[in-house]
Image (spheres, coloured by chain):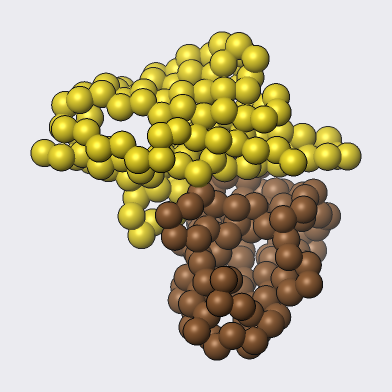
Chain colours: A yellow, B brown
Amino acid sequence: GQQVMQIPQYQHVQEGEDFTTYCNSSTTLSNIQWYKQRPGGHPVFLIQLVKSGEVKKQKRLTFQFGEAKKNSSLHITATQTTDVGTYFCAGLANAGGTSYGKLTFGQGTILTVHP
Amino acid sequence: EAGVAQSPRYKIIEKRQSVAFWCNPISGHATLYWYQQILGQGPKLLIQFQNNGVVDDSQLPKDRFSAERLKGVDSTLKIQPAKLEDSAVYLCASSLWTGEAFFGQGTRLTVV
């Protein structure tokens, strides 16, 4: 079945440092989505990438979708304490035997930011 | 617009008991997901509905877990009988076709 792997599992940074998390899928994706989950909270949607090689920016966050639509990355420039949380990628791929997409999450990267 | 509603928020049961969770998705969202999230891990897809049909339930432990989506709207997830390893947060989410998934607050289940 489809697998989505995410690295690193943990990342500790000093405030102001940059942060990057990487996501790889075992199958070609229709789209890749990124979510943030604060401690004790639920995943909250950040962005969706659909096109091969697509790059999107949200303030200090930059998201990339690989040319083969099997990998993605999230880069945060100059981290702030408000960036603390777990970042998940989620890949949408066709569920076997159907034309519908199945949304599979990676294991997440836990980001801690030291002031 | 109202978000995804889940109940209960918390549930503590003894092993071998049964439990049910309820989810009301955002109005008009055809896709509904149930995820299991064990502490420190990513959400694991248990079952995905498109309207009232099942798209994927390959990771649903069917000997003890069941789910239905009545009339393509509300959904219930049941565990019978529960095991200690079922302790987790059960998240319901809904979306339009292939877009952004909106999550509910989740139900934290503790099996003792």
- At 48% across and 77% down in the image, what residue appears? B110
- At 77% across and 59% down in the image, what residue appears? B72
Residue B31, how many percent across, how many down? 70, 48
| Nearer to me, B40 or B43 | B40
Judged left or right of residue B71, residue A38 is left
On screen, B70 above or below B80? above
Residue A48, how many percent across, how many down? 54, 29
Judged left or right of residue A44, residue B48 is right
- At 50% across and 65% down in the image, what residue appears? B89
- The answer to whether residue B62 of the structure is visible from this angle is yes
Judged left or right of residue A98, residue B4 is left
Q: How many numbered marks are there?
A: 0
- At 69% across and 74% down in the image, what residue appears? B78
Residue B3, how many percent across, how many down? 51, 56
On screen, B106 above or below A70? below
Judged left or right of residue A88, residue B29 is right
- Residue with the most extreme left position: A115
Report which quarter residue A102 is drawn in: top right
- Residue with the most extreme right position: A97
- The answer to whether residue B47 of the structure is visible from this angle is no
